[in-house]
Image: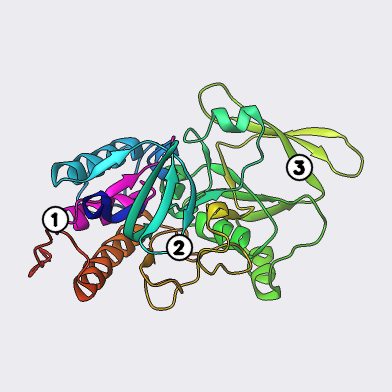
Amino acid sequence: MAQDIRNVIIIGSGPAGLTAAVYTARAELKPLVLAGASPGGQLMLTSEVENFPGFPKGVQGPELMQLMREQAVRFGAEVMDVNVESIDTEKRPFTVKAGGSTFKTHSIIIATGASARWLDIPSEQKLIGSGVSSCATCDGFFFKNKEIAVIGGGDSAMEEALFLTKFASKVTIIHRRDTLRASKIMQERTKKHPKIEFIWNAQVVEVLGENKVEGVRLEDTQTKEKSELKIEGLFLAIGHKPNTSFLEGQVELDKKGYVKVENQTLTNTEGVFVAGDVQDIRYRQAITAAGLGSMAAIDVEKWLEEKGLAADHKPTESYGR
């Protein structure tokens, strides 16, 4: 029945998904947000956010996500903390299966984000947000005049290390091999920088410290000899994995698994839109994700209006810029 078909389903509940929810709810599209069993995205792992506009004293990552969620609900968004198992875009309306239920929808906004790759050792997981980070741009400011380390050997790791030299007194790059994957120019920049040192053929087997990072225990990848390095911050730059496993065959993905965009937020499947880190391999910031979320919402509203599909929709004349 028509009343059982949603105007839009938003998959994901980070800054992109919740911003899209605010905009589509204000447009009276009555969005359904499938937030995931662990809602909130990567900001749930961030202790303090100081670069999101409107919070001059900073804000805790989980608090920011809760405020965004409350704002979306206030305007009429429905939020369910369930994981999406699959979507079917072959027939219209689309079908979304999540939390043991099946939903029909005219449009979908994919905002599932990307997850940082971790070492997956207990001591690391315990100290995420307490000295262990995967985002230098987000957390570098908190390590002024401190000695820190970066794990990785690609361009991202070199970029993170160079950025962190603006704050840290010393940056040690830890790499499990004796050669880097990074481009030659990035290698030259890091090797010439007076604040950067390298530890080769080493892997972190334990992060030291109870309530904050105090050091790491290293193992030589060739000799298996153990050693310790005193640091106050550990940044992982070993890549991100887009949360797109349920999308294969439904929208076009690139070779790394990120959703390909036709134009800003449009996928190759008409009626399916995308926002945030699930398509953004460059910036990966809360504010850019939120911006893409608003763009996806505006694109969805216009598309539904053009197709005459939006039930009870009143066209938005102003987006409150």
Marks 2 and 1: which is nearer the front? Answer: 2
Residue 256 appears left or right of 297: right
State the SS at label 1.
loop
* Residue furthest to the right: 223
Hey, what amino acid is under mark 2? Thr
Per the image, the residue denoted by label 3 is 203
Is residue 175 visible from the viewing direction of this image? yes
The dot on residue 28 is 1
Question: Which of the marked residues, 3 or 2, is nearer the chain's N terminus?
Answer: 2
- Residue 119, how many percent across, how many down? 66, 40
Is residue 194 visible from the viewing direction of this image? no
| 202 w.r.t. 270: above or below | above
Q: Residues within 10 Å of mark 3 (few under 14, many from 20)?
A: many
Quarter of the image for the C terminus: give it.
bottom left
* Residue furthest to the top: 210
- Residue 87, how many percent across, how many down? 47, 54
Question: Which of the marked residues, 2 or 1, is nearer the chain's N terminus?
Answer: 1
